[in-house]
Amino acid sequence: MQQTVSFRKTILATALAAATAPSLAQQLALEEVIVTATKRAATVQDIAATVNVVTGEDVDRFSAFTFSDLEDQTAGLSLGTPNARTSTLALRGVSVDPESGAAATVDTYWNDMVIAADVAFSELYDLERVEVLRGPQGTLQARTSPGGAINIITRKPDLTEASGYVQLTAGDADVLNGQVAWGGPIVENVFGLRVAAVYDEDDIGGAENAVTGTDANRDATSARLSGLWQITDDLSADFAYQYFDRDYESPAAVAGVDKLGERPSLKPADRTALGRTDNPGDFSFDLYNLTLNWAIGENLEVTSITSYYTTDKENNEQRDRAAYFEDPQANSTQTSVTEYEDLMQEVRLASLNNDFWDWMLGVYYQDRKTDTTFFTNTPVAALGAVISLGSNGEIPVASKQWSVFTANSLFLTDDLTLEFGLRYTDYENSRRADLFYGGLTYVAEGSNPTGVSIIDAGAGSRFPYEAIPEDEVDSDENAVTGSLTLRWDWTDDTALYTNYNRGYRPSGISINPDPNLRLFPDFPNDVKHDEETSDSIELGFKSRLMDGQASLNGALYYQKYDGYLGFVRSLQLADPDTGNVQAELPGGIIYNGDAVVWGAELEGQLRLTETWIMGGALSYVNATWDGAEAPCNEREPGEVFGTCDVDGDNIGGEPEWSASLNTEYYFPLQSTEIYLRGLYKYTGERDNTDASAGIGEVLDEFEAYHLLNGYVGWRSSEQTWDVSLWAKNLLDEDEIIYQRGPDQFDIAISGGSYTQPNVLAERSYGITARYNF
């Protein structure tokens, strides 16, 4: 595999050092971390871009059981779970609501295969590393996301030595996590297997439903089988299969003062729900991945990655979160089922170890299908009748994407390298959203038959409805993206670089399964959005200091967006004839606007002594609209919806400042060690993007907060066994991290009393025991 000139020097120096007795400086040198962010093996220090790595060891050291726990171990990365159904990712100030239907700003990968965000937000176990790539991914990655990419790399079998572990964790907050893994050669040097499994349960933040008596809960099970087959000296195959299933009950906590004076006054820290149901759900997936590597002579390699995965998600959501509709039998829930299927194929041909020019050519194909069906109950009390009306919908979405790409490295001198790449991508998309009337699902005893008939007929007259017109179902577009990088090895230990990258997200249409879309004056153009392009320039450095005891990497970046894809929730439409405001759209509206993002990132690590190591990261980002306007609820008389000037406003809900610090110190005994470990994360003030439409008394901005985790443990010197006590959120911070306005029933009946807030998980304690073999 290709390595940069400095990487070759590092390998040579390591080989020479192995022949001599190690000096003190060598004993204190930091370990090199090998990554495949550029589709070739290289150290983090040799990549002319910002790449952060959370190793499998880091995952275990800081008791990171789920994907969202990774956020604490680096700066400038946000991993959110606003509810048990959806997850969000953000890098460099940009994110996307997963329910918007827009392409992701940050894409996620599993062993180099693209996966949906909700697949990534699963349990972490038996990992090799997690690579965080920052900035536009316009050349080598399968998706040309503008914010970055995250690649989860699982542990592979060893063909010469068997190894494994057993780990058990228990704690308050109903935490129970058990892991087991084993791998090794079946036929030495030829074929190996590795199996791993996890069981995990907790209370998802501790909300309690005062009506049903149910505490929030989640349990997940996952298992993985990996294989490695060295077919010949030049041909190898590795495969991985992973199964996952999660069940949950996630009652939505509310906060506020009931304007009718009939319900309890609640603060966000009370973590109390008032709905009549507990938002139960189930999520499962199956991942399959096969990678073939074929070395052709000494200077060529062919790589093929074939992957396939399916997901099934079922969710039942309570839409009347404070039980304002008086009749408890008048159902107000929405049940949805989403089935997802994805097939991907990538083939690459790359040169190896050329003196002047290393190149790579590749093709990529993806075929993705999503099918969502839902049934919604809406209670109505009018004309002497109390009833529930049903509606059901089907939202099939299909997309095909194929790309050709090239990446090249020219070694101009021993110290100067020029890298450039191009990617051509063709997008074919198809989507529908068809709505149907489901009839009466409940009629209260004593309801006026005439009133029932009038309401039933009026509701039925609005259906069926095509939320996407026939001539907007299919679309086809293409894009050219790429990158250009210049790297200068200033000294043996310091490299400077500058790079240019282009990102792209395709055009589309907002999917809102609601007949009120008819009110838009220029439908469907009012809900369509154009493509987004972004151009980024980055200046950075990579350095090894103090004879390898320390590393310090930094970058400055500027990114200009043409038509950034913004998203607004809670948009209400007004009837232009009557002025009556309808219930908010069930989804939201994607819109375009120019934006500018700039910032700085710094990351470092220092081994102070043989027994003391520390690391940290700092991020600043400024991401604002540049002369843009957004849909909103501030409208003039006769307008269906308003348009608000957002010039200079933040484009997302990410903090400007964030920082992460970690340290470990251990005391060596005869054959054991006692260690102390700490992890600190600072998250600065953030805008509440769900306040953008202006509904309800919600915070415009979330306060900054500090998270501090502490660990103390005892382990064998060979680290065969390890027992640790840990405490998370030692300061017991309870800041609000997510908040939506009142639901439609609350607004209609009380005028809007309760918001839906999420707060930081309470302080928790636990113990972890691990045995390695």
Image (cartoon, grey):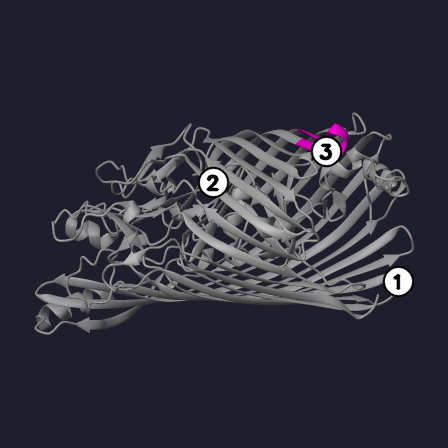
Given contact means CB atoms under 8 Å apart, are the residues at marks 1 and 2 in contact?
no
Pick the quarter of the image with the C terminus: bottom right
Q: Amino acid at mark 1?
A: Asp
The magenta stretch spans residue 544: yes
Q: Amino acid at mark 2?
A: Leu
Mark 1 vs mark 2, foreground winner is 2
Q: Is residue 61 depicted above or below 460 in this figure?
A: above
Q: Which residues are magenta?
A: 540-552
Identify the residue at horizontal 46%, vertical 29% (top origin): 626
Nearest the viewer among 335 and 263 is 263
The magenta stretch spans residue 753: no
How far apart in space, not on screen, are marks 3 and 2 (Cα)? Answer: 26 Å
Left/right placement of residue 184 relative to residue 677 reads right
The dot on residue 549 is: 3
How far apart in space, not on screen, are marks 1 and 2 (Cα)? Answer: 49 Å
Q: Amino acid at mark 3?
A: Gln
Identify the residue at horizontal 68%, vertical 66% (top origin): 182
Q: Earlier in the sequence, mark 3 or mark 1?
A: 1
Quadrant for residue 511, please give it: bottom left
Q: Which residue is mark 1?
A: 233
**Residue 395 rendering spot, x and y as whole percentages:** 43, 63
Q: Which residue is mark 2?
A: 708
Nearest the viewer among 279 and 642 is 279
Q: Earlier in the sequence, mark 1 or mark 2?
A: 1
Quadrant for residue 629, please give it: top left
Q: Is residue 648 visible?
A: yes
